[in-house]
Amino acid sequence: MVLPDENPVQKLAIISASGDSASFIGLHPRVNLNGKLNKNSFRTIKGGQTFETSIDAAAVYDLTAGGQFEVVAEGILPYASKRKIKGEYTYSTNKATLEVNGTAAAEIKHQLQRRNMLAPDCQQGRAAATYNSLAVCSNLAYVAGVQALSGNADQFHRYFRTKDPNARNTVAKRFFAVADECASRSNKAKTFCTDPRRLCRSDYISYTLGTEITNCDLYWTFPLINRACHGVGQATTTIHEMTHIEGLMNPSTDDFPGHYGWPALSTLPPEQARLNGDNYGFYANAIYTNDPNC
Ligand SMILES: [Zn+2]
């Protein structure tokens, strides 16, 4: 079993005619490999079986200079048994020569930046941190959605105050919408990294306005993922903010006054619990801790 990652992650080595390596412009996801992995992350290959995959090189490398490039696909394929990583194979292909149209490559790079939803104020460290946070947001939200649908009912009840299958379905749908958005599959939200509107206050971690999320200075002081039960991290904060995005899933969530954080969020009636942004961020964190008592 292998993990083919459909996101624009690094899987090729590309050298230009002048001998320079092309720069990587795709995602650098940091994925939690502890515990059981998502079934959809695997593909089963029997002995002698083959599968085909295509990679859009211009979405992963900056090929805007155009001209001839040599391409080698190389990397590692982790394999697993019972959804736990057991080891990895290395692979490497023959060299192929590509003739690249620089203008077309530039258009793909531009689309990718648009798709990745980062505002121009996201530069260097904060851009990289935001890509990581979005990649982890997508993963955590997906797993939380699966658990909301079919996981521990008592745990679901602690956050959403009901075990009703329709409510579980609605919560799961929202998590899947967030997972899609964080993976740049739905293109509704845009993220700012420096608060150009100057709306952050000293105690704001981040805020959402319409379809725009701004991460405030405080956001960058949190860990990407917080392993503690009810802990706050960047990725679960992004999940919370994504549930507010207009048009991602109607109605978008609110922040019910006085129901921010744990345990305040656990006292909302069920109809409000599933419309409160924090309930999503905290449930996703609880699922990540893998502790059914969290
Ligand atoms: Zn909020």
Image (tube, rainbow, N blue to C red):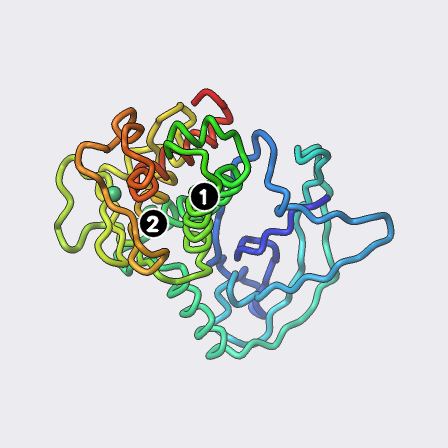
- Quarter of the image for residue 218 reads top left
Q: Which mark is residue 230?
A: none
The earlier-in-sequence mark between 1 and 2 is 1
Residue at the location (29% across, 34% down)? 269
**Residue 242 at x, y percent in the picture:** 34, 49
> Is 8 displayed left or right of 55 in the figure?
left
> Is 276 displayed left or right of 74 in the figure?
left
- Is ligand 1 closer than 8 angstroms to the Cβ of mark 1? no
**Residue 265 at x, y percent in the picture:** 28, 31
Give SS at disc 2: helix
Q: Amino acid at mark 2?
A: Met
Image quarter hosting the C terminus: top left
Ligand 1 picture quarter: top left
**Residue 57 at x, y percent in the picture:** 57, 65
Residue at the location (73% across, 34% down)? 81
How crowded is the residue under tag 2: few (<14 C-alpha within 10 Å), some, or many (20+)? many
The residue indicated by pointer 1 is 141
In the image, residue 160 above or below residue 185 = above
Pointer 1 and pointer 2: residues touching (CB < 8 Å)? yes
How crowded is the residue under tag 1: few (<14 C-alpha within 10 Å), some, or many (20+)? many
- Is ligand 1 closer than 8 angstroms to the Cβ of mark 2? no
The residue indicated by pointer 2 is 242
On the question of residue 94 being in view, the answer is: yes
Give SS at disc 1: helix
Residue at the location (18% across, 32% down)? 258
**Residue 185 at x, y percent in the picture:** 46, 60
Q: Amino acid at mark 1?
A: Ala
Q: Residue furthest top?
A: 293
Q: Nearer the viewer, residue 192 or 212?
A: 212
- Quarter of the image for residue 259 reads top left
Q: Nearer the viewer, residue 169 or 291?
A: 169
Q: CA distance from mark 1 to mark 2?
A: 10 Å
